[in-house]
Amino acid sequence: MIPRYSRAPMVAIWSPATKFRILFELEAHACDAMAKLGVVPAAAAAAIWERAPKEFDAAAIARIDEIEATTKHDIIAFLTYLAETIGDEARFMHQGMTSSDVLDSCLAVQLARASDILLDDVATLLAVLKARAFETKMMVCVGRSHGIHAEPTTMGLKFARWYAEMQRNHTRLVAARADIATCAISGAVGTFAHISPEVESYVAEKMGLEVEPISTQIIPRDRHAMFFATLGVIASSIENIATEIRHLQRTEVLEAEEYFSPGQKGSSAMPHKRNPVLSENLCGLARMVRSAVTPAMENVALWHERDISHSSVERMIAPDACITLDFALHRLTGMMEKLVLYPARMQKNMDALGGLIFSQRVLLALTQNNVNREDAYALVQRNAMKVWEQGADFLTELKADTDVTRALDADALTALFDIAFHTSQVDTIFARVFGG
């Protein structure tokens, strides 16, 4: 992933140095397990830990790449480098193992570590959304359906909705992490013919993984498909929030606005511009994360016990999707924390349609006062259309309509235009979302 959309801790997980270290630990722990079983000398297993490089620096990585240029095989190149570094004891490494054993288990470790960062990201975002929800709990604004004014709601309910959605995503990601964090060291075609299942169990415990119940030389790719699908859902939730902010920042709406820092410029041509650039960026990043989902799904169907058609895909989508989502979650958190809100503009927008936001309450009141629903709807709509077409005041028109006032007098009509009615259940909703 390009540095512009990357954060160092997540990038480090996908660096060659980290990958080679994980591969080494898998091989070395396997040697330890085989030493306990008497398959390899205990002294050799100890020497492997002692003589191996403590870190895989630029020189080590360059040497492995140099070897691979000849072998055309990454794991053989890695093992050849270890043999050069460790000496004769290196011959006991990789006993009964296949390339996929270490590559798949390494990927599982990387995805689990990436998941931990992403889970922290989501938790931080949840804290911000919760704080903003309670801050704006009763900040009344107009709700919209089809982009058109509907009825009053509150900004707090928007934040609470986003919180609940991200809470579900956190739960999904916990499950996805558990699903992906499995270790497979079962040898050729997964039969354990040349290596004991005890080795797999030992390595899994040491590396913080669960044992894959049945592998076919590779870890089943439905696990990976679910993992990347979960990242795609989280990305879609990010876009859901960002799209709402983009709409709320439109000049004609301007109920919310991304923080515009001192010295920031909005346009190279128009000095007045203050654009929702973070939200727009997040929508684009979400598309990139979701672009990993379909290839991950297509990786599930492989030939027989294994092929490597999935490998090239995962080498790209795993780091890119994780790095991009990490960056997007961090950016969204900062954006929501600093989001500027304009309550006066919210009130102005609510007043823009002359009281039409109370039409349903008038409709229901008429039906409760002996007017059938079809007639009540027609009475309310004909007065509402005067507001749309002539700029009239809805309450004034209703009070002048004798068909309406036969059922509801002026005082009764006025009482129906009370904003507090629409916020009466906000506490109930908050209790459902946040508890208490």
Image (tube, rainbow, N blue to C red):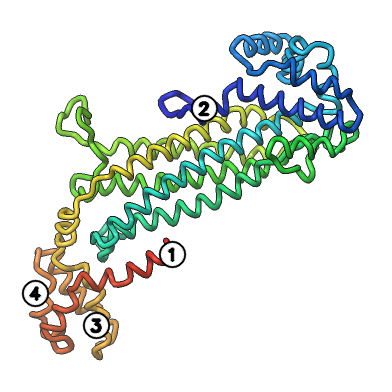
Cα–Cα span, label 4 and label 3: 17 Å
Cα–Cα span, label 1 and label 4: 42 Å
Type of amino acid at the residue the image marks with label 2: Val
Residue that numbered label 1 is attached to: 435
Describe the element under mark 1 as helix, strand or loop. loop
Q: Which of marks 2 and 3 is in front?
A: 2
Q: Nearer the viewer, mark 2 or mark 4?
A: 2
Residue that numbered label 2 is attached to: 11
Cα–Cα span, label 2 and label 4: 63 Å
Closest to the observer, 128 or 429:
128
First-in-chain label (2 vs 3): 2
First-in-chain label (3 vs 1): 3
The local crowd at label 4, few if under 14, some if 14 to 19, many if 20 or more residues have their Cα within 10 Å, is: some
The local crowd at label 3, few if under 14, some if 14 to 19, many if 20 or more residues have their Cα within 10 Å, is: some
First-in-chain label (1 vs 4): 4
Q: Which mark is residue 396?
A: 4
Type of amino acid at the residue the image marks with label 1: Gly
Type of amino acid at the residue the image marks with label 4: Thr
First-in-chain label (2 vs 4): 2
Closest to the observer, 363 or 237:
237
Residue that appears at 35% across and 40% down: 334
On the image, the x and y values in percent for residue 417 come to 17, 74
Type of amino acid at the residue the image marks with label 3: Ala
Residue that numbered label 3 is attached to: 365
First-in-chain label (1 vs 2): 2
Q: Are marks 4 and 3 in contact (CB under 8 Å)?
A: no
On the image, the x and y values in percent for residue 47 come to 79, 18
